[in-house]
Image: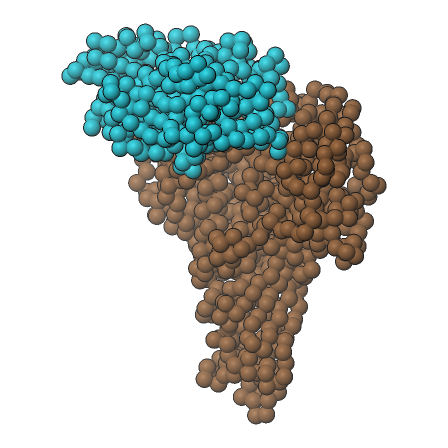
Chain colours: A cyan, B brown
Amino acid sequence: MNSFSYSRARDVAAAVDEVALPERQAKFIAGGTNLLDLMKENVMHPRHLVDITHLELNTIEDTLEGGLRLGALVTNADTAYHEQVDTRYPLLSKAILAGASPQLRNMATNGGNLMQRTRCYYFYDTATPCNKREPGTGCSAIRGFNRIHAILGTSEHCIATHPSDMCVALAALEAKVHVRGPHGDRAIPFADFHRLPGDTPELDNNLQPDELITAIELPPQGFADHHSYLKLRDRTSYAFALVSVAAALELDGDTIREARLALGGVAHKPWRDPEAEALLIGKSATRESFQLAAEKILQGAKGFPYNEFKIELARRAIVRAFEQALTNEK
Amino acid sequence: MATTHYIGQPTSRVDGRAKVTGQAKYAAEFNAPGLLHGVVVSSAIAKGKITHLDANEALQLEGVLQVFSHQNRPDLAWLDLSYKDMTAPGGSPFRPFYDEKILFNQQPVALVVAETFELARYAATLVRVQYESEEPTTSLEANLDDLYTPVSFKLGYQKPKSRGDFKAAFDQATTRIESEYYHGAEHHNPMEMHASTVFYEENGSLTIYDKTQGVLNSQHYVSMVFGLSKKNVRVLSPFVGGAFGSGLRPQYQLFMAVLAALELKRSVKVVLTRQQMFSFGHRPVTMQQVAIGATFDGKLEAIRHAAYSETSTFEDYVENIVNWSGMMYSCPNVEQEYKLVQLDMYTPLDMRSPGAATGVHALECAMDELAYKLNIDPLELRLRNYAEEEPSEEKPFSSKALRECYQQGAERFGWANRNPEPRSTKDGTALIGWGMATGMWDAMQMPTRATATLTSDGKLTVGSATADIGTGTYTIMTQIAAEMLGLPLENVTAQLGDSSLPLAFVEGGSATAASVGTAVTYVCEKIQKKLLKLAQAANNSPFAKAKLKDVTFSEGYLRLRSDATVAVSLTELMQQNSINTLEEKATALPKLLKQSKYARNTHSAVFVEVRVDEALGSILVTRVVSAIAAGRILNPKTARSQILGGVVWGISMALEEDTFMDHTYGRFMNHNLAEYHVAVNADIRDIDVIFVEEQDTIASPIGVKGVGEIGLVGVSAAVANAIFHATGKRVRDLPITLDKLL
């Protein structure tokens, strides 16, 4: 094991202070379901770990605005099975339960879910070049085995995907990420949290190294009546998405009043296109409408030799997810 | 054995409690004071040489004892023969640390030995290795120009055998199909990683706990390579956490742990990582061509089966892929071809049902294609070409209840209700399809020895140097011995996985139950004879004139068959004669002359239902019926588990398993269990197993034919055929992932 030091933070302010010392090359650790693997694989080498598991960020509470605030340290399992989440935001529950395994969901935290890193084979294998792991070494996946890679928002430097299911639902629900840094609190709209690879593929998101996620805020609108999380993968459980779709509708009879659509497994971040959603507003909830939205959100999609199929798969999955959303009235 | 108490009963595993309570110890779980830990450094390239290997930084850490590599390897055996284990294919076996050459990716290049595992693992990251890399050649498809016919000898390998005149018959056939099939590389991925714990004894002898399917094979390898007398090398492997062929050959962690122990004169443990489990052998990528010509009413006239597969640059790995096409159906003209390409990878390795899992897949998919072309029910086509005798050798089968398997399997599945039209059954967004296939494997009995010791307290111990790789060997040995001497199961102890026990072959090929079972039967028979003699020695013994066939052993008593009330307790018998222990050894040799007159095989009929999402291509196998003809079933519970495991693997092989080679690096990239997909619980629904028992004392004296492999053979073809029936799409590449159905 690479040697590292460890400290347990007593409160949020202390945690932020402890991680801020640059010479420490420190990382926060909570569930550790991804970070520990990456350390064992020699992919990440933090010199110091700040254990945040004892911070009081482990509650789920109503917000004044009528939404729900998910503590960063609530486990994925406790979140998915939380009565308020399950009734008001079933899309989120379903997305969480489509990911990982029960054992992992019992350990993994909400904050950590946002911070999990790509599952690109080359990122994980230090014998191969990877711009995300070692900037400037090149992207092996572009000309290599890229079945699980991105079709949207890629760059010549990186075609990795963000592996989370939970984040796809959070993107669709327009959650906010609350963070605390040395200069205080700020809230990051979910769409701005994760990044596209561009020419800095080593950065997964816009959280600063000395900032700590404290909570995820869900707005009041939960789309409990019409939603679907559809995940397509290479086995029925315990596999990352080839394509996943979070679809949500607010209907007035047959007419769509509001629509949300986010894709997983296709980009470096949960993929949304407000224009695709806008196309649906005022339209009837029909296959034709859903096909239009699918075409729009997939505009500019570019496949690689082994993942070309994802474009058509995503197109069909979007239509299916909206169709499922129509019929899941509570 | 007309009536039995134990044989044929669904006895739970005798080692089950030890396993679920953690008492059963595996190779990596043995410890000793001062045990050292070795961590292997694997090469980052597939071809070239090491130009520089610098271990100084690692060696400077306190607690790091040594870093072994080609630079400081002691002199070891130099003949290839010394490195050849009992299951090695032809060629020059890989020698760890032999020189600076890199022959395959993840080749072990150094072993770091330290006081703790954590330290060794950290120090391994500090070993600086520089390479001069050459472009590796790892793609079978891209190198078909380099195909050659292997001349390799390997245990169990049979050269393909053509008969008749395929070309003429094919040209004249009224109905013809020609198809190409492909499957990617697969890795065994047993739950337990390969590990060796070597105890260095004070007198310099070694006691080794090794993950292996054959302790004698590991003992042989260690003694030959390191020039040690076999009496100074004891190999134990009491429990094996799955192997599936990966434990047939001694793997490099054994070499490394022994090397370090001998050099440092300390006990050493080496455990491979999951990633390293992808570094020493796999089911090889294979391209197959099958052409079948038939008469208009479905009589096979001509079969051609060719397989092109991969091997390493140093050994010719061979398996029986195409042979099955000459054995399964009655057909006068058969042409077979089997060729290899040498690539920059480790030698492939037998993996459950080697050759048959893939060769029968291609043949049975082709048969389905032919059935559709002929407009004949796939099952009916097989019945019309039923081989009453084995056609390649023209010998009768020792037994073959395949027809009964077809009949019982079809009935249980409801095959008669099948609408043959593809895409004819829908349920919502799903297309439902039914497919079937035949399976076939060998029934083998290997020479095996066993011991038995009966003590005067009525406890019996039987032993043989075989393995229980999770299959239930302990249990069937116990059942047979308990049956033979009429003792309660709890009074019988089975011993195995110890090179100090009498000879048994490597556990493989589904031969263990027949081989070890017969040896245990024989040795218990010897004990029976001794007991009868003791009984006869008494004054006025009621057994005086009895022969062995006139007596029975039950509930701890020796009894007259004609009058069960005439009985003597075994314990009393021994105590009266002041005998504390009765000990016997027996050798069970297959009756080769008798066996050679027959073909000896197991058979199966597999029926599968799939649900395929019409728009999204996702596939779920909802129902499987597997009807098995494998002679006598010693234990329907453990045998059923074997078949269930085979069916699960067949589903996994059909839909999921694939190790991706990046040909630029010559490296398998999805080398972990998150990205190498094996079927999980959610993939598996109803599996129904039928055993059609056969009376067959030719295959083995105890009537057993073995069930380890047959459960897998044919399953992937039945799945692929069901997918065709559901969707009308014939996918000829495995695995059948959803993108192939879009």
Which residue is nearer to you in this view: A252 or B699?
A: A252
- Pinpoint residue B130: horizontal percent, then vertical percent: 74, 23
- Identity of the residue drawn at 75% across and 36% down: B67
Residue B683 in the image: state x and y as whole percent.
Answer: 40, 37
Residue at 74% x, 29% y: name it: B57
Q: Tell whether B630 sits left or right of B741.
A: right
Q: Quadrant of residue B88?
A: top right
Q: Of B199 and B571, which appears nearest the observer?
A: B199
Instruction: Tell me where residue B151 sits by quadrant.
Output: top right
Between residue B612 and residue A179, name the one nearer to us: A179
Q: Position of residue B576 (x, y in %)?
A: 59, 86
Judge whether residue B305 can be spotted in this image.
no
Would residue A41 be found to the left or right of residue B300 on screen?
A: right
Q: Is residue B501 above or below residue A171?
A: below
- For image coordinates 55% across by 80% down, the residue present is B571
Quadrant placement of the C terminus of chain B: top left
User: Relative to B239, is A242 on the left or the right?
Assistant: left
In this view, the residue in front, A213 or B511, is A213
Number of numbered discs: 0
User: From what the image shows, is residue B438 above or below residue B374?
Assistant: below
Q: Quadrant of residue B82?
A: top right
Residue at screen point 56% across, 89% down: B541
Q: Is residue B93 above or below residue A123?
A: below
Q: Residue B619, image x and y in percent? A: 39, 31
